[in-house]
Image (tube, helix red, strand yellow):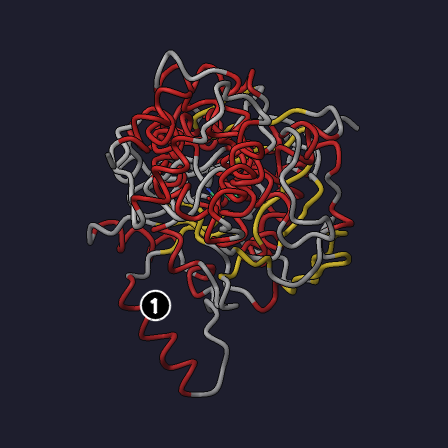
Amino acid sequence: MSVKVRFAPSPTGKLHVGNVRTALVNWLFAKGQGGEFVLRIDDTDLARSTPEFERGIEDDLRWLGLVWDERHNQSKRFDRYEAAAEALKSAGRLYACYETAEELDRRRKVQLSRGLPPIYDRAALSLTDAEKAAYEAEGRRPHWRFKLDGRRVSWEDLSRGHAEVDTASMSDPVLIREDGLFLYTLPSVVDDLDMAISHVIRGEDHVTNTGAQIEIFEALIAAGWGGRVPGFAHMPLLVGADGQALSKRLGSLSISEMREQGYEPIAIVSHLGRIGTSDPLEVGESIEALGAGFAFSKMGRSPARYDTADLDRLNAQALHAMPYEAARPRLAEVDADLGEDFWNVVRANLQKFGDVVEMARLVRGPVVPVIEDPAFVATAARLLPETIDAGAWSVWTEAVKAETGARGGALFRPLRLALTGQTHGPEMAALIPLIGRDGIIARLGSVA
Ligand code: GLU
């Protein structure tokens, strides 16, 4: 069976690390097996969906490298959902209900007070035509519920192993609201069938849904709808570094914000693709390489820990390993003259790519030298070698040491402070050839 998966975001907000992890795991699973990745925009809720959010989702996915092979909008497929609803009505699986939200709420409270589970009592199933007509005459519009079989629905979950949901313990789900809106449940099933989705991969918060949706898949197929029930994988959810569920904080972890903060896409996908798995939390060579190494068997059952400190570490790792060819166009955006030597010296000191601006300033100035002992610095300036090459730093510091007797921190610290104005930074041996002899003299000489 060929692998075809879908990522189905609702364009009612920005992508955050939670839904991007779902997108990514779908992508890695499919691409690792030469399969296809479908982007399906779940925009049946026309009032809450916006074209801006939709564009934002696409921009974020493209930026992360999660390219799709097919793309659909649910809002363009209402005729299919209508047809599916008709098929379910004919099969006696979709029935009209007229209760108001308040009525339902009251019944739930009564059930709870009697110690009963708050499950819809199916009162609407016994409405006569006359009673329905009376409701309609009152101006009520029906909402439509799917009649569950009330059995143990089971499947072999790629992530959880054998999974079961008892649909007898659930209310018949509402598929169509009284205003005609198709809720997510039915369109999702229709699309998965029509698009020949082989695997539905999503968070474990959807496990109960899956029980109901498998019944809908089967009901449609029994009614002659083409296609087959897909396989399922429900991933453990993300928790923060503190072990608490991330769900409430996800709003502040949007991909667009992370992009603005200067994170590398490869760091984000390496992090999200590997947390909660047995793979080491290291940056991958490419998203394709991550796909080749992906397997659900590596994914544990416990929640995946999302820790910004890990992401920061992977981001620095990605920069330290970035070859000049990859950095070149981005360096050119900062300054046309930042070449390969510059990159090879500074990359080990970068946390974010944007730090190159500060590194470029260290090389070219302006730098405000910090000179605590002018006599020492003047001596050093006098001993500066003629040629500032890769070996110049050790020749120079040996000479300064021989003349002044300074060693260790007492030798290196004042030179670094005078040349960069800072106590820490790139390796001086590599930095001084970039600064050049004139630059060095200018900084040391500013004492005199
Ligand atoms: N739009 C749904 C969601 O974001 C899709 C869930 C699914 O993958 O089926 O929750």
Q: Residue furthest top?
A: 336
Q: Is residue 89 visible?
A: no
* Quadrant location of the N terminus in the rendered image: top right
Q: Horizontal and vertical percent for residue 9?
A: 45, 38
Which residue is at the front of the view, 10 or 22? 22
- In the displayed structure, does residue 431 sit left or right of residue 371? right
Q: Residue furthest bottom?
A: 114
- In the displayed structure, does residue 227 sit left or right of residue 313? right
Q: Horizontal and vertical percent for residue 84?
A: 52, 34
Q: Horizontal and vertical percent for residue 329?
A: 45, 14
| Residue at image point 76% right, 26% down | 2
| Residue at image point 26% right, 29% down | 366
Number of marks drawn: 1
- In the displayed structure, does residue 134 sit left or right of residue 259? left
Q: Is residue 66 above or below residue 420?
A: above
Residue indicated by mark 1:
104
Which residue is at the front of the view, 434 or 395? 395
- In the displayed structure, does residue 201 sit left or right of residue 434? right
Q: Is residue 80 visible?
A: yes
Quarter residue 425 falls in: top left
The amino acid pointed to by label 1 is: Leu
**Disc 1 Cβ-to-ligand 1 distance below 8 Å:** no
Q: Is residue 171 above or below residue 253?
A: below
| Residue at image point 39% right, 40% down | 258
Which residue is at the front of the view, 438 or 30? 438
Q: Horizontal and vertical percent for residue 50?
A: 28, 32
Circle 1 crowding by C-alpha within 10 Å: few under 14, some 14–19, many from 20? some
* Quadrant location of the C terminus in the rendered image: top left
The residue tagged with tag 1: helix, strand or loop? helix
Which residue is at the front of the view, 287 or 440? 440
Q: Residue furthest front?
A: 403
